[in-house]
Image (spheres, rainbow, N blue to C red):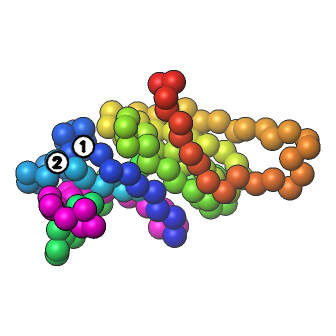
Amino acid sequence: QVLGGGVVKCSNVISLVCAADLGQAEWCLLLAGWDGSMLPIAVVPLAPSGHPDTSWLPADGEVIRPCLDAPVDAEDAKQGITALHVEPRFGRLWILYAKGKLDAWDLLNSQSLGSWEPHWSLGAGDFRPVAICDANEGG
C-alpha cells in the first residue's frame, strides 16, 4: 500500500536483526512498507556489479524478508498512512498519517524521535500533505 526506502551502507544497518546475513555486500536497501495493519522493516543487500545499470539491484533470487515491525499509532493508523520516508544517512523513518500527523523513528537505535501535528496556515485552503522530504544538511 505504501513503501519507503533508501540505499544505505550495510555496515550502518548491521544492528538490525534482519541484517545478520548480508554477506559481503557494501550497500543495502533499507525498506519500510505499510500493508494496512503492520509496518514491516527489511534490509536487502545489493549485488556488487561493474555495470552502472545494475549496480543498485538486489542479487537474482534475493528474497525480501521483513525482520521487525516499526511501531505505529493504532488510532492514527486506522485513518491510514499517506507516506513513508526512509532517510538513509541516519536511518530515520518518517510516517505521515492521513490526518497530517508525523511520527519519526530512529530505526538504527530503535527509538522514537517524536510526534508532531503540524497546523497549516489558514491560507492553505484544502491543502493536505502527501509526501515527505527530509533535508538533513543541518543535522
According to the picture, the residue beneath numbered tag 2 turns out to be: 26
Closest to the observer, 69 or 75 = 69
Residue 62 lies, with reference to residue 73, above or below; the image says below
Amino acid type of the residue tagged 2 in the rendering = Glu
- Asked if residue 68 lies left or right of residue 35, the reply is left
- Residue 73 on image: x %, y %: 56, 48
Amino acid type of the residue tagged 1 in the rendering = Lys
At 19% from the left and 65% from the top, the residue drawn is: 51
- Asked if residue 28 lies left or right of residue 41, the reply is left
Q: What segment carries the magenta color?
A: 33-54
In the rendered structure, does residue 40 fall within the stretch colored magenta?
Answer: yes
Give how far apart the Cα atoms at labels 1 and 2 are: 6 Å
According to the picture, the residue beneath numbered tag 1 turns out to be: 9
Q: Residue furthest top?
A: 138
At 91% from the left and 41% from the top, the residue drawn is: 122
Q: Residue furthest bottom?
A: 61
SS assignment at label 2: loop
Q: Are marks 1 and 2 in contact (CB under 8 Å)?
A: yes
- The quadrant in which residue 81 appears is bottom right
Q: Specify whether residue 70 is in view.
A: yes
- Residue 55 on image: x %, y %: 23, 61
At 53% from the left and 36% from the top, the residue drawn is: 135
